[in-house]
Amino acid sequence: MDGDRAGVLGVVLAGGLARRMGGGDKTLLMLAGRPMLSHLLERLAPQVAAVAVNANGDPRRFAAAAPGVAVVADGEPGYPGPLAGILAGMDFAATLGLKAVVSLPGDTPLIPMDLVERLHAAAKPLACAASLGRVHPPVGYWPVSLREGLRAAVRGGEGKVSRWAGGQGCGVVSWEGDPFLNANAPGDLALLEAALHA
Ligand SMILES: Nc1nc2c(ncn2[C@@H]2O[C@H](COP(=O)(O)OP(=O)(O)OP(=O)(O)O)[C@@H](O)[C@H]2O)c(=O)[nH]1
């Protein structure tokens, strides 16, 4: 295994409430005949040492789409936002002896195959992805060494990924096109399916 991915846990963030989608698990919605999560893991798993899904509630609902994949819940109550999922990923990475987390929202199934390699190379100490002139902070590289600082921030009410990441020092890596196209509302699924087939 090469150095970039050897110490990295890939974490699919699926701990939100998906209100704009009408609730439920966005990452389990079907895209081209299989769950979005299955597309995402197919691209993520070869880039990392291990993968996990961050989600709250009964973990068994992910078993079919992600067989054998660990599901880790937020350690902080009350749906405090994606930072809580990144923190849960860091805590799990620490138990595996891994040095960093790469996080991805569960509704971004088109991620690039050089994601982990390029984020790792740009980390100072964090790195976030960008496309179409926008930064996507939940797509990021997070050293586990920052987890106690992140825990304190989340407990202190920090809910904005970009603000916390910017305060630590965050390299930005840009990709051509829109490999981080995601599904917020039902109408977005057709756009994703078209992009998948493009
Ligand atoms: N662990 C965790 N993840 C979260 C939380 N809130 C949002 N996320 C995740 O952060 C990512 C970006 O959030 P959104 O795309 O807005 O997803 P969402 O919050 O489920 O959707 P809306 O309710 O429609 O905003 C998604 O992957 C969510 O699953 C949270 O409280 N805990």
Image: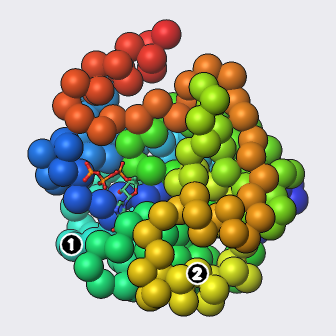
Ligand 1 lies in quarter: bottom left
What percent of the width, then of the height, locates residue 117?
Answer: 79, 47
Answer above or below: position of 99 versus 128: below
Left or right position of 8 against 138: right
Q: How many marks?
A: 2
> Mark 1 — residue?
58
Left or right position of 20 against 179: left
Neighbourhood count class around disc 1 (C-alpha, 10 Å): few under 14, some 14–19, many 20 upward: few
Q: Quadrant of the N terminus?
A: bottom right
Q: Is residue 43 at all visible to an observer of this figure?
A: yes
Q: Judging from the image, what secondary structure is the residue with disc 2 in? A: helix
Q: Point out the residue furthest to the left here.
A: 22
What percent of the width, then of the height, locates residue 34?
Answer: 30, 34
CA distance separating discs 1 and 2:
25 Å
What kind of residue is marked 2?
Leu
Residue 135 figure quarter: top right
> Mark 2 — residue?
150
Q: Judging from the image, what secondary structure is the residue with disc 1 in? A: loop
